[in-house]
Amino acid sequence: MHEYSIAYDLYATARKAALEHHADRVKKVSVEVGKMAMVNPDQVIFLFDTIKEDDPLFGKTVLECNEISPQTKCTCGYAGSEIYVCPQCGALPELVKGREIVVTNIEIEVDDE
Ligand SMILES: [Zn+2]
């Protein structure tokens, strides 16, 4: 399942970052999801919640998915958001952004000793 591996990757990435920073809790994980990544953000959030359930570090973590629009460019010089046909020359534009899923921010809490 596509979404499951994505959700697991996000969890693993956030967990690694949290441990590196000696976090006691992870408050929020922000993710950019390209619209061309063909994933359902609601499903990723649901699966993320299932995966993190037994991990005390992630007791109250909110996963925030921000969908980002595709960006394309063409050899003729066109740059924009048309993904199938270049409006200037009719060729297939190249996708430069919009297929990726990236963690953009992780908010953690550290208890004072
Ligand atoms: Zn073009």
Image: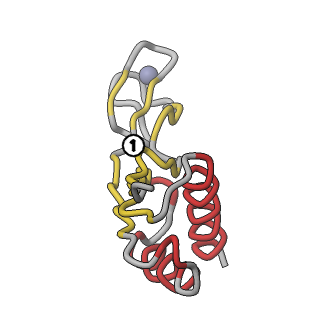
Residue 54: x and y in percent read: 58, 86
User: Which residue in the rendered view is the most extreme toward the top?
Assistant: 77
Q: Nearer the viewer, residue 74 or 8?
A: 8
* Secondary structure beneath label 1: loop
Q: Quadrant of the N terminus?
A: bottom right
Classify residue 43 by image quadrant: bottom left
Which color scheme did the rendering employ for the protein? secondary structure
Q: Residue at x 36, y 63 (%)?
A: 27
Residue 9: x and y in percent read: 64, 62
Q: Nearer the viewer, residue 33 or 85?
A: 33
Residue 58: x and y in percent read: 48, 73
- In the image, taking residue 70 as reference, residue 23 lies left or right, namely right
Vertical relation: 72 (above or below) 26: above
Q: Residue at x 55, y 57 (%)?
A: 14
Ligand 1 image position (quadrant): top left
Vertical relation: 46 (above or below) 72: below
Vertical relation: 106 (above or below) 43: above
Q: Quadrant of the C terminus?
A: bottom left
Amino acid beneath label 1:
Pro
Q: Residue at x 58, y 65 (%)?
A: 11
Residue 42: x and y in percent read: 38, 76
Q: Residue at x 52, y 78 (%)?
A: 56
Identify the residue under disc 1: 70
Disc 1 packing (10 Å; few <14; some 14–19; many ≥20)? some
